[in-house]
Image (cartoon, grey):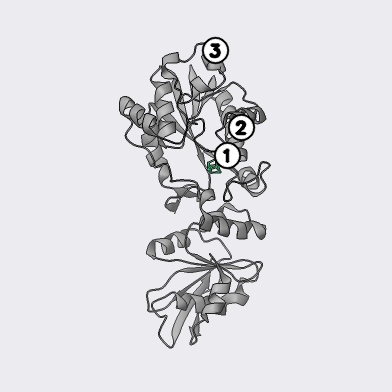
Amino acid sequence: MKAVVLFSGGLDSCLVAKIISSQGIEAIALYFKTPFVSGKLYRDPKTGVPQSTEINILKRRAHQSGAELKVFSTGNDYIELIRSPRYGYGTNLNPCIDCKIYFYRCAFEIMKEEDAQFLVTGEVLGQRPMTQSKPILIMMERRAEVEKLVLRPLSAKLLPRTIPEEKGWVRDDMLYDIQGRGRRRQMELAKEFNITDYSSPAGGCLLTDPSFCNRLKDLFDHNITEMNDIHLLKLGRHFRLSENVKLIVGRNQSENRVIGELVEPGDILLEVVGYGSPLCLLRGIGAEAFLKVSAQICKRYSDARNVAKAKIRYWKVDELPTRYFTITKNIPEPELKEKMII
Ligand code: SF4
């Protein structure tokens, strides 16, 4: 017997993976890698794709739950779904119902590929108002065409019976009647099953973070849905200089490093010479026309902010040799604020 567990690395999904694996059922911990997960970024040396360091941690947590981690990388279809969800958004740009239906569907495909018999989630009845009421859970299953195949061990006793329960594939005494937002019973189970390593309940999805969503909305409003642009939203200060051009300014050394790793051909980089400086990335069609204002902004956020004259180095990735600008006037604060995407 094999089951695919939708796995985030949080307490509930760690618990249900353990509940399943400890009954002798092979558990595949399926993690959905989306560009909307917080965490440090680096460029994978083999694939060149930005990655979050979380994967190693998730492997460890899956192992602790007796499951094997499998990573599913979401693609442009997922971004499109975030951009125009059928069931609308939560408080921010989080279209949780559409997102869950998408996850169920993909998990069902993996279930068939892996010759597994059912799906498992850590969902708890009433824990989240948007997606975890009984009618919504049932509706999402129907839309994803996985009716009666999704076992939710933590609330199974309060929900309609599923195929794995009807067929006796899972032990009845390992199904629970937990509901609501409290975590007391999950903590007790964690002790019982010796689950100590899991992520905090608040962490995770940037689609619930208002300032990230402002930046994302700006991208969507300008018809940009590239993964690389979305990854860049997680760092730096962002300035919209025109319909097509944006400037991203690193806030510290580690952001400068990641910005340097996320550059693409055609991007222009700028930094102040001889002072502590942000690395600034200028991107978009016709970006050259915004070099001067970018140099001003670069100076504004460098250690040369209060000096009368500063030299700014700039170069186009893969093309131009390094050139220089001299900036003698600071950019006026109102103009700076007007361009900034909060
Ligand atoms: S919080 Fe984020 S990842 Fe979770 S269901 Fe909602 S949109 Fe999807």
* Dot 1 beta carbon under 8 Å from ligand 1: yes
Q: Quick one: label 2, few (<14), some, or many (20+) residues within 10 Å?
A: some
Numbered badge on residue 136 = 2
Q: The residue under label 2 is which amino acid type?
A: Ile
Q: CA distance from mark 1 to mark 3?
A: 28 Å
Q: CB under 8 Å between callouts 2 and 1?
A: yes
Q: CA distance from mark 2 to mark 3?
A: 22 Å
Of labels 1 and 3, earlier in sequence is 1
Look at the numbered disc 1 and give the secondary structure of its residue: loop
- Nearer the observer, 30 or 144: 144
Q: Circle 1 is placed at which residue position?
A: 130
Q: Residue at x 47, y 29 (%)?
A: 179
Residue 242 pos. (x, y %): 64, 70
Determine the quadrant in which ligand 1 lies.
Answer: top right
Residue 94 pos. (x, y %): 57, 46
Q: Quick one: label 3, few (<14), some, or many (20+) residues within 10 Å?
A: few
Of labels 2 and 3, earlier in sequence is 2
* Dot 3 beta carbon under 8 Å from ligand 1: no
Q: The residue under label 1 is which amino acid type?
A: Met
Look at the numbered disc 3 and give the secondary structure of its residue: helix
Look at the numbered disc 2 and give the secondary structure of its residue: helix
Which quarter of the figure has residue 173?
A: top left
Q: Circle 3 is placed at which residue position?
A: 166
Q: The residue under label 3 is which amino acid type?
A: Glu
